[in-house]
Image (tube, grey):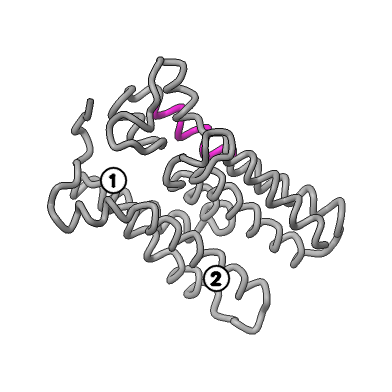
Amino acid sequence: MALSVLLSFVLAYLLGSINTSVIIGKLKGIDIRKKGSGNAGMTNTLRVVGKGAAALVFLFDFLKTIIALLLAIYISKIFVPDNKDASLYMQYVAGFGAVLGHNFPIYFGFKGGKGIVCSIAVILFLDWRIGIIIATVCILIMIITKYVSLGSVVGAIIYPIFVIAFNPDFSQVTVRLYIAMSVVISLLALYRHRTNISRLLKGTESKLGHKKD
């Protein structure tokens, strides 16, 4: 089973490393990582390139993560058929791998985005109830405050809390691994938003709709 878990992670990481924001930027003759906030993600693409490009980034980032998770399920059926726990292990590993790849893409010098769209895809795929709750909270915060980063940070903080709330049976190994994965993804998101958090505290964070050169 170790080989199948490793394969799930590697494929997910390689898929996650395909950064649409960087690719679109290159097609436009720019390096998105040197414009605006310097982040190779949907929000910076929106500010620097426009709505159409941002929509493409969101769609691809979401789909590449879903594909990574589906591949993990497919691999589990080949290597360990009829083993539901093994399938869950591989999904957790693949979910993390896709987010990690987006953040640190091997194809682009390990400098990518912050993995929020990928994280949303993982959350929804593993438990749509948690996904809808967190997405609703994040969107409301973004609409009210106009701070995309604040919504993302709050979502990262509450994700493990809801995973624990919806999975109270800690005696199950799959539950403990699920919680561990949610904590790791949450911490990674907070780490990647560390400069945003600093700017939020100082009151200098850019609001949605503010376009940077």
Q: Residue at x 43, y 71 (%)?
A: 161
Q: Residue at x 74, y 55 (%)?
A: 6
Say whether disc 2 or disc 1 marks the residue closer to the N-terminus: 1
Q: Is residue 5 magenta?
A: no
Q: Position of residue 171 (x, y in %)?
A: 64, 84
Q: Position of residue 55 (x, y in %)?
A: 42, 29
In the image: residue 27, left or right of residue 89: left
Magenta stretch: helix, strand or loop mostly:
helix
In this view, 54 is above or below 187: above
Residue under numbered circle 1: 148
Compare residues 139 and 3 and report the one nearer the observer. 3
Amino acid type at mark 2: Ile
Q: CA distance from mark 2 to mark 1?
A: 25 Å
Amino acid type at mark 1: Val
Which picture quadrant has residue 132?
bottom left
Seen as rendered, the residue at the extreme left is 203
Q: Is residue 63 magenta?
A: yes
In the image: residue 11, left or right of residue 186: right
Q: Are marks 2 and 1 in contact (CB under 8 Å)?
A: no
Residue under numbered circle 2: 179
Q: Which residues are magenta?
A: 54-64
Which picture quadrant has residue 180?
bottom right
In the image: residue 24, left or right of residue 14: left
Compare residues 31 and 144 and report the one nearer the observer. 31
The kind of secondary structure element at disc 2 is helix
Seen as rendered, the residue at the extreme front is 109
In the image: residue 137, left or right of residue 69: left
Q: Residue at x 45, y 35 (%)?
A: 58
Q: Position of residue 19 (x, y in %)?
A: 51, 33
Q: Position of residue 126 (x, y in %)?
A: 59, 57
In this view, 159 is above or below 69: below
